[in-house]
Image: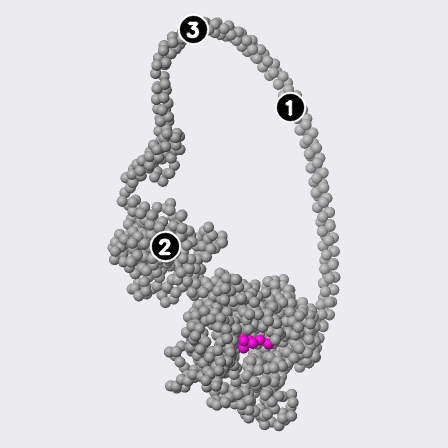
């Protein structure tokens, strides 16, 4: 039986701020502190999650926790970010509602970590499978890439996001992820050129210099020393807890997983290196005849290296730093730049180069992670954006960020009220109008198209004449003076004339989170965000692969004299699109708070937390949630939790649950004005009523626990007694059985002993009788044997004596004849012995030598030959070996048919093409080239196909045609004739493609032991419309050899090129796809496997040899 739990069980402080009593700012902060001290970092405000940054790792994100919160009710367990993520995911999967998760808070509050936790939870609970896991991995690995290029160390956070990110994760009808789309907002590109004291530039600069190999740094013309680069701050270059070298390896791996090709990664690193080099370019003044100063580059070494990285002519970029061309209608005018303007142009180029590179990265990631299917998707959006910022010195960036937070607060209040109102209407509860602060007036002050601050800033930037920050402030003072949320020392409103806390060059806006003082200096320049056209055109001329994509306005053929949109206008438009997107989704909120500014654990600063609570509008949120009824709960859950308080509902209520709740509340004497009945929920107005019920439930549970203990103890004692009684009966029965068995065994044993003794006595008597009879028979046999032996020995002695006499006569005669022969031989030997012995010796040596040569085989491949036995045979031995080898080669060649001769010629040609170039070649040497592996002439299945081919088929084999979409193979019949090759369906024999060999440009294969090969067609040929063919075959060596041999022997066509490389491009219709071969592990099996990594990469994993 599943144990029912609740948010109210074992509660530290109050888990839901809606139930906080009394409700004020002090009690709100105290409740957060109490829960933070007990490692409870999550608290609810209704369905909103407050997240406190613990600045340390907590054991609350384990796989066990994921399973604990999976498919559980939102209020069923203690507050956790997993509960919100699970609620959003289940609503998307089961109710087909698009979701969005809005994560807000100031820098260092843990927004980025919160978004990672949400994405990791969704990845853990959604479906499994190879393709699904690949999509999940790509979505998760996009974070390290964006963090490296978009995050930096600040005073408040060591990994602060310096851009806003909104990711739409797309799911199918089962709830499995299909892909995603990322949108980025307002990268803080000014950080590229200048960082405040104690802060760093973007992570990627430090990671590249710390983690890249020496060879990579040499190619990028970089040095590991941070101090050699003007754009890198030195006072905080090294950060405790950040390993830049390890992070660089993580980023490289993440880019590979997301789908970046190696050439793209190298291009990105070259642009990063170019930004660093750009910061080292310095200028000096040079006087001209007209009296004006002209800027000149001091040391051209950094300029030269940067130009080499980007592929730009040094003179073109040097001129762009010294002159500016102004175009108006049909006129062009060139003006010189002084040193200050040159530095401005350099920094503007660096900022634009980096920000456009970042936007390209986001676009490139979107290409890899976007959903491939065209059907409608379910969408979950995750918004991780900068929080409200109030610094000592607030400029244009803080103004834009705070404007975005005003819009988010506006949509937050609207959606929260709408959600409350919809629930009241759904439950048939009377809606009570809720009073709250509507910040629409502040949003209108900023974004109004006529007299809003952004509109006036754009108007001032576009106005001809002298435009400065002071003229912009004068315009604000004129138009916004009477606005209740605008304050300025120089406005027409007299009450601010003597306000010394308001400097002359500043204006103040009363945001929903408090008043913020903005310094007007730099507003116009940052809004203009101008990049001189000369620099854009210089960048467009670069030969670097990315520059034309990053600077399209530099194209001389498409010169646009229209002024580009301002930064404020672009951001306002993107925020408008974001708000419309959020309005179409069901919102879920995570409010992040940091407990202290020291970035250490166990410290809770009341004033800092109070400040964040105010500008996040959390108290306002609680009041909106509590304006009607503070607590609501389904009838089933309410009755299940409090049924023990009423005898009529305990232990089980048999009727409708609503009737049971009515009986329960009536019995508990709860005043009728304290609650209301909805269609499916009970609504409780005051938290005190809920806490009273909880106290009564706690007391009742103690009584029930006592009763349960009493009943359990009685049951346990009775069970123990009955067990003892039953055991005694069983023991007695077993003992009686044991005693009877023992008695029976003793009687049986005695009987067996007596029987054995009687049988033994009888057996011994019979044995004695048999032994006596046997001894009598043996005595007679022995006497007869001795008599026969005596007779035989006498006869033997007689025969031996007779034989001895005959042998003596023979020996004497033999000795006499030998004596006569020896006398005669001595006379003959003295005359001819020497020559005879010599001839006989030579004859025996030669006979033995030639007999030894008989062991040599007739195979021409056998190089063995007997060793030379004697020195006088040296010349004959060598000549005999040569003559014999020529003779057996002639014999062997004489056995060849024309067909076999052709096969050996093909083997020789295969050796010239593949020997020492492809790992598959050695295993093919011993395999004869068969040609027709399908027996197409004999097999009736291929009669139709045989009729479709007019010429003689030189090769017929079964191959796999590789599909670009998924990397899987489809079986095809491959036929090769002297004029074309044909691909046909394996089952039907229908011809799928017939390509003339003159249209074949080249063949590409890898150096490894796989069977993949690409047939590349000539561009513009009739057969090239459908693209190249990527095939795999077990007889790759024979196929390519025959193709090459046909091209070599044909006089009317060019020889076919054979390209052997581990990475080559294949044209599929309109797109080129890179096929990359890598060494795989044992998990790949014995065959090569092809997988689609992304739209432009197929990866073939070849087993290790």
How busy is the neighbourhood of tag 1: few (under 14 within 10 Å), some, or many (20 plus)? few
In this picture, which residue range is highlighted in magenta?
188-196
Residue corresponding to mark 2: 959
Residue 601 in the image: x percent, y percent? Answer: 67, 69
The question of residue 192 being in magenta is answered with: yes
Residue corresponding to mark 3: 812
Regarding residue 95, the answer to whether it shows in the image is no
Q: Earlier in the sequence, mark 3 or mark 2?
A: 3
Location of residue 910 with respect to 71 vertically, above or below: above
Front residue of 886/71: it is 886
Residue drawn at the location 73% of the way across and 53% of the way down: 720
Q: Earlier in the sequence, mark 1 or mark 2?
A: 1
Element under disc 1: helix
- Its colouring scheme is one colour
Residue corresponding to mark 1: 759
Question: For the residues carrying marks 1 and 2, which lies nearer the camera in this image?
Answer: 2
């Amino acid at each position: 039986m599943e144990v029912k739990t609740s948010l109210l069980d074992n509660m530290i402080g109050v888990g839901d701020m809606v139930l906080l009593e009394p409700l004020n700012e002090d009690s709100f902060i105290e409740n957060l502190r109490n829960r933070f001290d007990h490692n409870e970092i999550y608290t609810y405000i209704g369905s909103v999650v407050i997240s406190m940054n613990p600045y340390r790792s907590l054991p609350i994100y384990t796989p066990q926790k994921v399973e604990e919160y999976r498919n559980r009710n939102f209020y069923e367990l203690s507050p956790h970010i997993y509960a919100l993520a699970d609620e959003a995911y289940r609503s998307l999967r089961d109710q087909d509602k698009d979701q969005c998760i809005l994560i807000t808070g100031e820098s260092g509050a843990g927004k980025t970590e919160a978004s990672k936790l949400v994405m990791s939870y969704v990845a853990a609970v959604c479906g499994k499978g190879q393709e699904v896991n690949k999509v999940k991995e790509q979505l998760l690995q996009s974070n390290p890439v964006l963090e490296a290029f978009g995050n930096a160390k600040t005073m408040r956070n060591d990994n602060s996001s310096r851009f806003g990110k909104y990711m739409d994760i797309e799911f199918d009808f089962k709830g499995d992820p299909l892909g995603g789309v990322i949108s980025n907002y307002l990268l803080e590109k000014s950080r590229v050129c200048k960082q405040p004291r104690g802060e760093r530039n973007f992570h990627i600069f430090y990671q590249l210099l710390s983690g890249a190999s020496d060879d990579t740094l040499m190619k990028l013309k970089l040095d590991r020393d941070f101090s050699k680069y003007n754009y890198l701050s030195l006072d905080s270059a090294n950060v405790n807890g950040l390993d830049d070298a390890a992070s660089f390896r993580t980023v490289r791996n993440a880019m590979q997983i997301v789908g970046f090709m190696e050439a793209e990664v190298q291009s990105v690193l070259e642009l990063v290196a170019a930004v660093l080099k750009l910061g080292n370019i310095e200028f000096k003044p040079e006087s001209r005849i007209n009296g004006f100063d002209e800027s000149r580059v001091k040391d051209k070494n950094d300029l030269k290296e940067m130009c080499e990285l980007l592929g730009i002519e040094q003179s073109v970029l040097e001129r762009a730093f010294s002159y500016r061309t102004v175009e108006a209608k049909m006129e062009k005018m060139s003006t010189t730049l002084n040193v200050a303007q040159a530095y401005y142009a350099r920094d503007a180029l660096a900022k634009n180069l980096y920000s456009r590179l970042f936007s390209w990265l986001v676009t490139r990631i979107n290409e890899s992670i976007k959903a491939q299917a065209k059907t409608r998707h379910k969408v979950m959006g995750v918004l991780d954006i900068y929080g409200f910022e109030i610094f000592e010195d607030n400029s244009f960036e803080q103004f834009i960020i705070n404007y975005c937070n005003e819009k988010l607060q506006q949509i937050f209040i609207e959606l929260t009220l709408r959600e409350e109102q919809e629930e009241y209407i759904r439950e048939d509860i009377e809606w009570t109008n809720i009073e709250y602060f509507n910040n629409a007036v502040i949003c209108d002050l900023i974004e109004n198209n006529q007299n809003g601050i952004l509109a006036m800033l754009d108007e001032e930037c576009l106005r001809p004449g002298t435009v400065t920050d002071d003229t912009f402030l004068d315009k604000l003072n004129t138009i916004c003076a009477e606005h209740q949320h605008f304050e300025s020392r120089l406005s027409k409103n007299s009450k601010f004339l003597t306000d010394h806390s308001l400097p002359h060059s500043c204006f103040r806006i009363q945001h929903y989170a408090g008043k913020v003082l903005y310094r007007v200096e730099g507003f116009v320049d940052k809004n203009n965000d101008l990049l001189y056209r000369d620099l854009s055109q210089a960048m467009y001329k670069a030969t670097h692969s990315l520059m034309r994509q990053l600077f399209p306005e530099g194209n001389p053929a498409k010169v646009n004299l229209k002024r580009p949109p301002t930064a404020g206008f672009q951001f306002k438009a993107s925020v408008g699109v974001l708000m419309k997107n959020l309005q179409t989704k069901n919102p879920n909120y995570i409010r992040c708070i940091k407990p202290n500014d020291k970035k250490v654990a166990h410290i809770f600063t009341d004033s800092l937390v109070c400040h964040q609570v105010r500008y996040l509008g959390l108290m306002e949120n609680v009041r909106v949630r509590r304006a009607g009824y503070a607590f609501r709960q389904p009838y089933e859950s309410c009755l299940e939790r409090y049924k023990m308080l009423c005898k009529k509902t305990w232990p089980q209520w048999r009727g409708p649950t609503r009737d049971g709740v009515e009986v329960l509340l009536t019995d508990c004497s709860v005043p009728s004005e304290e609650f209301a009945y909805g269609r499916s929920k009970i609504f409780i107005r005051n938290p005190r009523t809920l806490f009273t019920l909880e106290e009564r439930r706690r007391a009742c549970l103690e009584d029930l626990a006592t009763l349960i203990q009493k009943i359990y103890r009685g049951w346990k004692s009775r069970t123990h007694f009955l067990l003892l009684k039953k055991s005694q009966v069983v023991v007695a029965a077993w003992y009686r059985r044991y005693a009877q068995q023992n008695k029976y065994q003793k009687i049986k044993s005695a009987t067996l002993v007596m029987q054995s003794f009687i049988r033994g006595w009888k057996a011994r008597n019979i044995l004695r009788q048999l032994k006596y009879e046997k001894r009598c028979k043996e005595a007679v046999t022995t006497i007869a044997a001795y008599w026969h032996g005596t007779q035989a020995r006498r006869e033997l002695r007689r025969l031996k004596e007779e034989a001895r006499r005959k042998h003596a006569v023979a020996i004497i005669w033999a000795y006499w004849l030998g004596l006569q022969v020896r006398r005669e031989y001595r006379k003959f030997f003295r005359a001819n012995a020497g020559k005879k012995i010599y001839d006989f010796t030579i004859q025996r040596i030669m006979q033995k030598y030639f007999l030894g040569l008989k062991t040599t085989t007739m195979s021409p491949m056998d190089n063995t030959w007997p060793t030379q036995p004697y020195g006088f045979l040296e010349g004959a031995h060598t000549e005999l070996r040569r003559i014999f080898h020529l003779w057996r080669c002639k014999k062997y060649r004489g056995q060849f048919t024309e067909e076999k001769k052709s096969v050996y010629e093909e083997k020789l040609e295969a050796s010239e093409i593949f020997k020492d170039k492809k790992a598959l070649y050695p295993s093919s040497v011993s395999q004869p080239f068969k040609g027709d592996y399908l027996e197409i002439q004999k097999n009736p299945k291929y009669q139709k196909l045989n009729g479709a081919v007019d010429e003689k088929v030189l090769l017929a084999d079964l191959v796999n045609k590789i599909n670009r979409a998924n990397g899987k193979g489809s079986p095809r019949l491959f036929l090769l004739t002297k004029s074309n090759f044909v691909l046909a369906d394996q089952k039907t024999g229908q011809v799928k493609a017939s390509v003339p060999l003159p249209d074949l440009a080249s063949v590409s294969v890898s150096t490894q032991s796989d069977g993949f090969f690409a047939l590349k067609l000539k561009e513009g040929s009739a057969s090239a419309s459908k693209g190249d063919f990527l095939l795999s075959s077990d007889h790759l060596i024979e196929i390519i050899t025959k193709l090459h041999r046909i091209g070599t022997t044909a006089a009317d066509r060019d020889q076919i090129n054979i390209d052997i490389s581990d990475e080559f491009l294949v044209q599929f219709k309109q797109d080129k796809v890179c096929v990359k071969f890598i060494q795989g592990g044992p998990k790949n099996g014995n065959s090569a496997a092809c997988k689609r990594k992304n739209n432009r990469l197929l990866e073939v994993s070849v087993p290790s040899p």
